[in-house]
Amino acid sequence: MMRKIQSAPTIYYPESDGKPMAETDKHRDLMVAIIQMLQYYFRNKPVYVSGNLLIYYEQGNIKKCVAPDVFVVFGVSKKRCRTYLTWEEGNTPDFVLELASPSTFREDMRKKKDLYASVLGVKEYYIYDPYGEINPYFIGFRLIDGEYQEIDFVNDRLNSEVLNLELGGHDGKLRLYDPKTEQWLQPPPERVEDAEERAQTAEERAQQEAAARQNLEAELTKVLLEIEQLREKSGS
């Protein structure tokens, strides 16, 4: 009797590691803001931006995974992923940002740092504590010859050669600075608020110009009337 050939079981890669999305509201809000700013900045380029998403880096092993707070992968099309499988995408992250706290800093500086350098080959790795409770509260590394070298601050910012942006504090928050435009990137709420302010300013200016035009027309009408009255007097 011939045995039935059975297909290999499909491996399910969990979408959650059971850990919370972020330790605090401040961590979560900053994570979302950085992701949204990067997504908008790279909106017209084949760059995948995500965060708090499980990255599996060894096919068939569901234990080999990590979930960076923010990560960027170049050469991968934009999509909605449930998990990120490196062997399917063909690329590992080029940029990673971890939002640290006193309870996670040791893992961020040791275990994850080694993983990002030696296994995933992340070109740039940044660690930032929104509350400034750890020392250093902000640090960046660049992968050189397989090892991380600390990035020096210039003008109180860390230059990302990967993103062509600079990371630094702005209005008390971690933000991204574009040296080409010499402007800070804005998260969606700030962009909307800025657009609304510009629209309101333009509307106020238009109203002022309309009022000035009406005043000018009224003054012109008055002058013409006075001229007409003078002509009538001189004719009589």
Image (cartoon, helix red, strand yellow):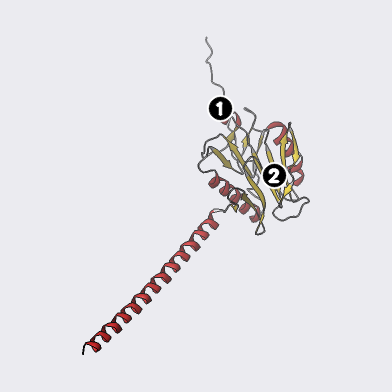
Left or right, 214 with respect to 177, comes to left
Left or right, 141 with respect to 185, comes to right
- Give the residue pinned by disc 2: 126
* Number of other residues with Cα within 10 Å of mark 2, as a class: few under 14, some 14 to 19, many 20 or more: many
The amino acid sitting under disc 1 is Thr
Which of the two discs, 2 and 1, labels the residue nearer the N terminus? 1
Disc ID at residue 139: none
Quarter of the image where one finds residue 109: top right
Secondary structure of the residue carrying numbered label 2: strand
The reply to whether discs 2 and 1 touch (Cβ–Cβ < 8 Å) is no
In the rendering, at what x and y percent does residue 1 appear?
A: 52, 9
In the rendering, at what x and y percent does residue 97 appear?
A: 66, 44
Q: Which quadrant: the C terminus? A: bottom left
Q: In the rendered image of this protein, does residue 90 appear above or below residue 206?
A: above
In the rendering, at what x and y percent does residue 167 appear?
A: 66, 49
What residue is rendered at 58% in x and 42% in y? Answer: 50
* Residue ranking furthest to the left: 236
The amino acid sitting under disc 2 is Tyr
User: From mark 2 to mark 1, how far is it between C-alphas?
Assistant: 35 Å
In the rendering, at what x and y percent does residue 234 appear?
A: 24, 88
What residue is rendered at 46% in x and 62% in y? Answer: 199
Closest to the camera, between mark 2 and mark 1, is 2
* Residue ranking furthest to the right: 135
* Number of other residues with Cα within 10 Å of mark 1, as a class: few under 14, some 14 to 19, many 20 or more: few
Disc ID at residue 10: 1
Q: In the rendered image of this protein, does residue 68 appear above or below residue 224?
A: above
Q: In the rendered image of this protein, does residue 129 appear above or below residue 213?
A: above
Q: Nearer the viewer, residue 226 or 9?
A: 226
